[in-house]
Amino acid sequence: MSTPAIRITAVTKHYGSLQALAGIDLEIGQGEFFGLLGPNGAGKTTLISALAGLIRADSGKLEIMGHDVTTDYRKARLKLGVVPQELVFDPFFTVREMLRFQAGYFGIRGNNDWIDEILHRLDLSSKAEANMRTLSGGMKRRVLVAQALVHRPPVIVLDEPTAGVDVELRQNLWRFIKKLNADGHTILLTTHYLEEAETLCGRIAMMKAGRIVALDTTANLLSRSAVRRLKVRAERPAAALALGGTAAGDWLEFGFDAPGEIETLLARLREAGAGVCEIAVGEPELEQVFVEVMRHA
């Protein structure tokens, strides 16, 4: 059995009376694209900070590719690249200089070809010689991604990487990250854009109040926790509502479990004289699952 990319065992962390992490157990396999979701204050960033060695857990153990982040921290940090939420940068250097310095922190020299590839993939080539102070917020976030990748870590943590960036950057970034994952890199993603997690992640853990309250494959989470919906636009909405539908803007929604129930629902609408003009079938969405899990956790 291969060593997990990330292994977290019984990890706790307190800030005074606040329990930020309440005994986290989690393993992420090599090559996974894994999602870590939760509301603000759930403990996601605290957990990532502990993995990166920015804070020390009160108890428990954290490992990156088999290396303990406390007792074997040099190797552990060499195996990890983190893209933080905050825009942290040195205002005195160009983009290329920043990446060279970042590589130097890991003892890496002469990797200009890899730096050029990162700049190209993140559409930063035209800004390579620009001072960091002159960049827009979206460009600065691209540089943070580049910094996390400059030492070619096998494990990459993305903490809200697309917050506040435009659609084009988001699409370019995910193309690059998916290629890295296809090449064998392990990706740990936190995001409030749940459609990103639903599309990209093979497995997902959901956190609340410092605990993992759900952990499964994305497909299993969707199938077991969310209801499919038949969306209907009707000439006489009141007749449709009388059958138990719920209003969603100009549409009415009816939940169903199996596709065979759709015809029964449509027949009931016809019999009620609702006058169906348009229909659409909504598949389960991770947002529904997330809201349900948080409500019952």
Image: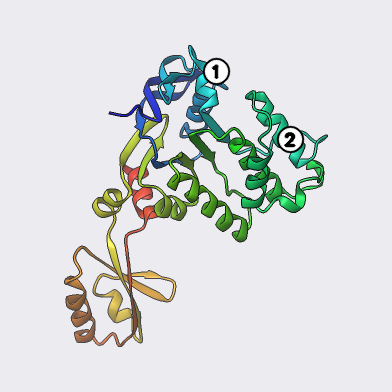
Specify the amino acid type for callout 2: Met
Helix, strand or loop at disc 2? Answer: helix
Query: In the image, residue 253 lies at what x, y percent?
Result: 32, 70
At mark 1, the secondary structure is helix
Which corner quadrant of the image does residue 277 belong to? bottom left
- Where is residue 58 drawn, in percent x and y? 46, 14
Answer yes or no: is residue 134 visible. yes
Q: Give the quarter of the figure containing the C terminus.
A: top left
Q: Quadrant of the N terminus?
A: top left
Residue denoted by label 2: 98
Residue 158 spot, x, y in % from top left: 53, 40
Give 201 or 183, whichever is nearer the viewer.
183
Which quadrant of the view contains residue 168? bottom right
Q: Which of marks 2 and 1 is nearer the N terminus?
A: 1
Question: Image point 50% across, 22% down: which residue?
Answer: 76
Q: Position of residue 207 (x, y in %)?
A: 40, 36
- In the rendered structure, the answer to whether residue 227 lies left or right of residue 6 reads left
In the picture, the disc for residue 74 is: 1
Three-letter amino acid code at the position of disc 1: Arg
Circles 2 and 1: CB atoms closer than 8 Å = no
Is residue 271 depicted above or below 74 in this figure?
below
